[in-house]
Image (cartoon, rainbow, N blue to C red):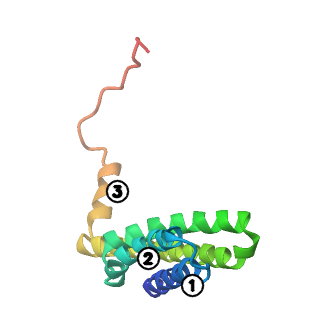
Amino acid sequence: MPLIIIRTGLLALLALQLLWHGLLPPPRSAMGWSALVVATLPLLLVLPGAWRARPLPLFWANLLCLAYFSHGVSEAWTQPAMRPLALLETVLAVAVVCAYAVLGLRSRRAARAAQAQHEPGRDNAAQAGANDTTGPARAPSTPNPAA
């Protein structure tokens, strides 16, 4: 489910950027087109790898969403006319970041479960070693006089 949210959120962010920077503003100059390229090119670069659920593109997509979040907050604060689009951008970015966090937690939990299943007696041996008092006695540590 988190991967579906990430994919949908990235596609929605791309569509929003195309709408916001490509279709809504009147064609003033080349500056409008450069804003469209700057807003969409990073998403276009990470989207194929994120779609295939590769870890590195997913990480970079998550990192990019932090930039889109910042952009959305600053636009919502400074441009009242663009506030609905800016808030939508902010919500989409937060949804992708939260879904990525859930995906990471689930994969970490699955890795720990697989490791515990692979080494079933590891925890018991560590606890037995901690409670073992039959080993050689250690000299008590002396405080460092220089300290």
**Residue 96, image x, y percentages:** 51, 76
Q: Position of residue 17 (x, y in %)?
A: 53, 78
* Residue 36 place in picture, x, y as percent: 49, 74
Residue pointed to by mark 2: 103
The front one of 80 and 117 is: 80
For discs 3 and 1, the disc positioned in front in the rendered view? 1
Q: Going from the N terminus, do you reach mark 3 or mark 1 first?
A: 1
Q: Residues within 10 Å of mark 1 (few under 14, many from 20)?
A: few
Which residue is at a point 76% across and 71% down the rendered structure image?
A: 80
The answer to which of marks 3 and 2 sits earlier in the sequence is 2
Q: CA distance from mark 3 to mark 1?
A: 64 Å
> Measured along the vertical axis of the image, is residue 92 above or below residue 123?
below
The residue depicted at 47 percent of the width and 80 percent of the height is 10
Position of residue 79 measured from the top left corner of the image (x, y, whole percent): 72, 68
* Residue where numbered disc 3 is placed: 127
Say if mark 1 contacts mark 2, CB within 8 Å.
no
Residue nearest the observer in this picture, 141 or 71: 71
Report the Cα–Cα distance between label 1 and label 2. Answer: 34 Å
Tag shown at residue 23: 1
Residue drawn at (29%, 31%), measured in percent from left and top?
A: 138
Q: Quadrant of residue 109?
A: bottom left
* SS category of the residue bearing label 3: helix
* Residue type, numbered disc 3: Gln
User: Residue type at mark 1?
Assistant: Leu
